[in-house]
Amino acid sequence: MKDSSSARNYKRFLISAGRQWALIFLVLETLVFIIFARGFFSLKGLQIIFFFSTAIFLLGTAETFVIITGGIDLSVGFIMGFASIVSAKLIVILSNMGISPGLSILIGIIITLLVGLIPGYINGTLVARLKVPSFIATFSMLSITYGISELLIQGVPAKNLPYLANNIGNGYFIYILPGKLVTLFKKPAIVRGEPLIEIIPNVVVFTFLFVFIFSFILKRTKFGQHTYAIGGNIEAAVRAGINVKSHLIKIYMVSSFFSTLAGIMYMLKYVTGKGDAGATFLLDAIVAVVIGGASLYGGIGTVGKTILGCLIIAVLETGLRMMGVPTFEKYIAVGIVLIFAVLIDQFFPELIHKED
Amino acid sequence: MASNTAIPVSAGKERSEIVIIFARNWALFFLIFLTAVFSFTGKGFFSLKNFQNILYLSTIFLLLATAETYVIISGGIDLSVGFVMGLSSVLSAKIMQIMHEALIAGPVTIIILGTLIAIGVSLMPGLINGVLIARYNVPPFIATLGMWGIANGITLKICQGFPVSYLPPGLVELGNGYIVYILPGKAFSFFHKPFGIEDSQIRELIRIIPNAIIFFVVVLSIFWFILNKTKFGQHNYAIGGSKDAAVRAGINVKKHLIIVYTLSSFLAGLAGVFNVFQTGIGNFTPFSAMYELFAIAAVVIGGASLMGGKGRIIGSCIGVILLRLIANGLSIAGVEPFYRFIAVGLILIIAVVIDQLFPDLF
Amino acid sequence: MEYILEVQDLTKKFGGLVAVNNVSMGVYPGEVVGLLGDNGAGKSTLIKMVSGVYHPDGGRILFKGEEVKITSPIDALAMGIETLYQDLALAENLNVYSNIFLGREKLKKFLGFVNVLDHNQMLSESKKVLHGLEIEIPSLKNKIRMLSGGQRQAVAISRSIYWEAKFLIMDEPTAALGITEQKKVLDMMRTLKDQGLGIIVISHQLRDIFSVTDRLVIMRRGFKVAERMTKETNPDEIVGLIVGAETVNK
């Protein structure tokens, strides 16, 4: 029966192609924007996508860890805002004390990273020790963090940060003066009119450094394995002797660590801190994780696939912005993409949760 | 069977009756307690005017919380109510604005038309949510999150980011009116200010029972009745308790859920329209308002469980009033607004911890 | 010969209810003891005290003749007491060898300083164990959710074997299994028995009980009401003791 076997092969091809639907969608939307958005198809355009989306990548990674354990972290956006304010204020205080800009920034960032672990610790304790559902615990933390952020700011945005912060936040990793020199991190002095090629914004470097490290952790270490185990069958994890409570606390601390990083990136980019800086990114992060194939019930998902989801959102938002489409349309688009993603999961479950 | 025999039922009897009554109504007790505290911390808190103000501002939240009560009892969640409310607010205002500018009809007709159309349109998001959730098994969190974005986008598109104003007169009077007006010793009227009084006397005017209260008492009563006295309400609890059991008992769960989510966005639409009556303009919902999360918080404080199967409208109302009271009390006491966020977060945690300690109260 | 595991006057209360009431019993190495009783008799509470999930309110536990305090599942596991729960406690989203090594993963060094999972070693060790039990599982990289009931049972048992259990507790091991798989599980139990493990098995399947146990302990309402050598009794008497009224001591 030659017909049916070629039909079968065709079907198999469709299924394995369909498995990559997210990738295909990414390619398609990229093509659409290349055609319709001016400036999209350029080195600059590519970098703009990543530059503006660092928060999505970081928060998406944060949510991946939490969602795999079967929970959710609603506070990521506001921890990001909190961190942006704390870091900005710290740096201003330190540099006003006479400490050099470089050192102020470094110390300010380190302290912020440490302080940013606290909301995560509280979230984790609420969820693991007090058995508060993660939805509620992290919503409470969202609210509390927002309140504290506004308290710190008192309506006055932080400013007067050292110029170095701006340079770092908006600087690039590699500078190429064609035919002349290549420098790392330092922008070479140029004569006006000389072409300067800038590659990979600093903030993108920092972002992906941490994303890669934690992706490795999730995939290859005992910590990652236990995370999946807890998400898959929490009883099994308990009976296998895993300290589930302490592990969950660490997971929420990882999440707030990434949220804090996102806030620090924001501060570096825009040289200020804002309480609701990250509010809209929560939706993006969750959508990205879902597109990436993680199940909201836990146990499934990887950072890599989440990043793919983040890319889809990042390209979508940046592309729409470059086309001059106002922000509101963006919400519609993201909402539709989300529903689309889940429907695909419904109709073709074998596509997403494939077994080898 | 064997290995999962947990703590036997009789173990619960250890707790005394008083503790149970307290835990069951902790929100109410806390409300009374806070009322007493705030009476001392701020002048003007403990007054008829202020209490009516609290209730008045709570109206939209009460409607949203009722919506969430239904949805949460059924085992789901509706994140889109805040933005559906914004959609209906903006849509009704826009329609009224267009008709008013074009002088198509008299104010009353315009108001009625604008209201009805907006409410009608606001059934759509709920319908879509319901179908996605019931027919296509999309998790409620996701479906309503998607609708959250879409509704917001459409809203902003309609109003281009600005509140919609220039609406027919009489709107605001309706929304802000009271049933009884008393000028002590002199005049006494219903539904509108007594005629012929001078401006200087307006300050002494005592207003009783905002129209708003009639409105939400009526609406809430209807929905309370449906939830507690009808088969539909009973099924709602059943589905939330165990969807499987409900299916096997022959309940048309799919149809039921579609209705529940439609009802939810209907209430949100109602809230949006009412908002226009209250403020006189059509307002989109800003991100930072987080109405849906406050509504959900109120429902949880009121004793519902996010797992479904538990919850009462009265409880949700108490939750809403508690949250609004805190906001009001804190602001009268001169405390900065951001503390409100901290307070809400803490109370929510308390609510859930109490729920943990006393799992079988309702 | 002395008991490998013994409980003396073990008691557990929940509020006002006494779930386990001064129960004493023991298991010899190489012996399978059936723990029987109706719902609510206290069987699972008893084994949960031995496996570290519950703390006893009274009495003591002796392992290899010495009194021990088991404060958590990790303590029990460390001593060599492995428990196979009715719900198997396997993570559906992880594969076979990951489940066998859950909580006790084998690690190797990456770049000299980071500890990462040693998949290869875990895979090969798991193959050995499963082979020893004569269980066929096509690929150990398959996730648990793709396995049949009997295969899952085998994975759970392999976990205990690998960690050199000295004492095994099995709760309803044959429930929800087909006939062939039930037989395989019973064969596995006999193999383990021959290797010198002590086993307690809880089951409602009297046919299985009579086929594999050496001794029977019957509980009712928290008390131990009887003890019999399997060879010296019959199903009717056992059912009578499970539901009956008198307390009969051996």
Image: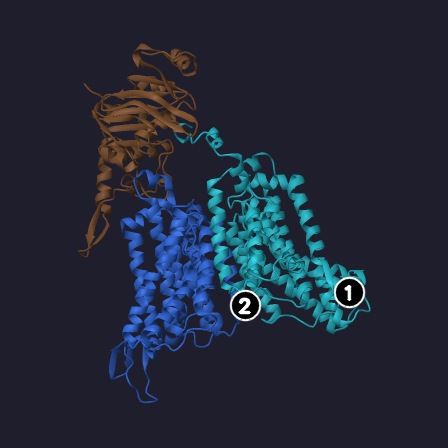
Between residue B74 and residue C4, name the one nearer to us: C4
Say yes or no: labels 1 and 2 on the same chain: no
The answer for which chain carries disc 2 is A
In whole angstroms, how far apart are the C-alphas of marks 1 and 2? 42 Å
Task: From the image, state the color of chain B.
Answer: cyan
Between residue B128 and residue B161, name the one nearer to us: B161
Between residue A249 and residue B161, name the one nearer to us: A249
Which chain does the brown colour mark? C
Q: Which residue is mark 1?
A: B193
Residue A9's place in the image compared with A101, above or below, is above
Question: Of helix, strand and loop, which one carries label 1?
Answer: loop
Mark 1 nearby-residue class (10 Å; few <14, some 14–19, many ≥20): many
Residue B52 place in picture, x, y as percent: 66, 58
In the rendered image, which quarter is residue B200 located in? bottom right
Residue A331 place in picture, x, y as percent: 52, 64
Residue A106 place in picture, x, y as percent: 29, 70
User: How many marks can you see?
Assistant: 2
Residue C228's place in the image compared with B181, above or below, is above
- Please say whether residue B336 is visible from this viewpoint: yes
Which chain does the blue colour mark? A
Give amino acid for label 1: Lys
Q: Quadrant of the N terminus of chain B?
A: top left
In the rendered image, which quarter is residue B202 located in? bottom right
Residue B195 place in picture, x, y as percent: 81, 67
Mark 2 nearby-residue class (10 Å; few <14, some 14–19, many ≥20): some
Question: Of helix, strand and loop, which one carries label 2?
Answer: helix
Give amino acid for label 2: Phe
Q: Which residue is mark 2?
A: A328
- Please say whether residue A340 is visible from this viewpoint: no
Residue B57 as seen in the image, left or right of residue B336: right
Between residue A140 and residue C138, name the one nearer to us: A140
